[in-house]
Image (cartoon, rainbow, N blue to C red):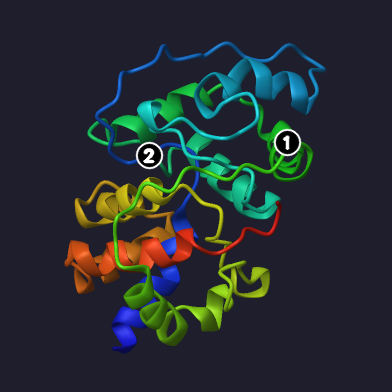
Amino acid sequence: MLRFALLLTLLGSFISCGDSRTDGPDPAITMTAAPAGADSSEIWQQQCGVCHGAAGEGNRALGAPALTQLSSDYLTRQLTHFVNGVRGADPKDQAGHRMALSVALLAPSDIPALAAFISTDLPPARPEDTRKGDAARGKDYYTHLCSACHGSNALGNPILGAPALAGASDWYLKSSYQGFLDGLRGQHADDVYGAQMARLAPALPDEDDLDDVIAHIATLPPKRS
C-alpha cells in the first residue's frame, strides 16, 4: 500500500509538455530560434502554440497536453530537462523527442519568463474529460493515497514539489504513466525524480485502477477557472 501511495503521489509530478506515446500525426518540428529580444508572448506564438494551442488548451491529436494549470516552477524544470536532453532523448518516445527538438534552440535565459507566461498570462483551460474509469472508486484511492501530497482537491503542494493534477489532460496522465512503464522516461542520470517514478511504476500495472484514479481527478475543479 505504501508503494502504491508513493506511486500515485509521483504520478502528477512528471506531467509536462509532450506526450510519451501518441498515435496522432507527426507535426512539423519548429526549430527556428526566437529573434533576439523576443518576449514570452512571441516565443509562445512562434514555438509553442502550434502544438499546444494558442491558449495552451492542448491538442490530443498531436500528443500536446494542456499546460495552463501547471506552476511556473514546474514548467521551468521540465523545459530545462527538454533543452538539456534529460527528457525526450529516446527516439522511441515520439512526442517527447518531438518536444525536445522543438525547444532545442530555446535560450535557457528565456525559460523562466516563458513558464511564467504560460501559467499566469494564458487563459485557464479545462481539457475535455476523455477517461472512462470509475470516479467513485478512484476517489477512495486518491483520498487515502494521494491527497497528503497533492492536496484533497489535487491542487498540488509546491513545498513537496507536487504539482496540481486537477485541470490536467486526463489522457496525458495516462500516457505519461505508460511512458514510465515502457522505459521511455526516467532513464537519464540527471532525471532524479523521473528515475524514482520509473522504479515505482511497475507497482501499478493494472490499467483499470489507474483509469479510476484519473477519472476522479478529472472531476476536481482546477485552481484557475
Q: Measure the C-alpha gap from mark 1 to mark 2.
A: 21 Å
Number of the label disc, if any, that sits on residue 21: none
Image: 113 above or below 149: above
Residue at image point 77% right, 38% down? 113
Q: Position of residue 78 (x, y in %)?
A: 54, 46
Residue at image point 38% right, 82% down? 140
Image: 144 above or below 78: below
Quadrant assignment, res 106 = top right
Q: Where is residue 80 in the image (x, y as percent from the top left)?
A: 57, 42
Residue at image point 28% right, 65% down? 210
Q: Is mark 1 on a helix, strand or loop?
A: loop
Q: Which of marks 1 and 2 is in front?
A: 1
Q: What residue type is labelled 1?
A: Leu
Q: Where is residue 138 in the image (x, y as percent from the top left)?
A: 36, 73
Image: 21 above or below 224: above
Q: Where is residue 222 in the image (x, y as percent from the top left)?
A: 63, 58
Look at the image and tell me in which quarter the N terminus lies: bottom left
Number of the label disc, if any, that sits on residue 19: 2
Count the marks: how many?
2
Q: Which amino acid does label 2 sit on?
A: Asp
**Would residue 32 be found to the left or right of residue 172 on screen?**
right
Pointer 1 residue? 122
Which of disc 2 and disc 1 is earlier in sequence? 2
Question: Circle 2: is it few (<14), some (14-19), or many (20+) Cα within 10 Å?
Answer: many
Image: 5 above or below 192: below
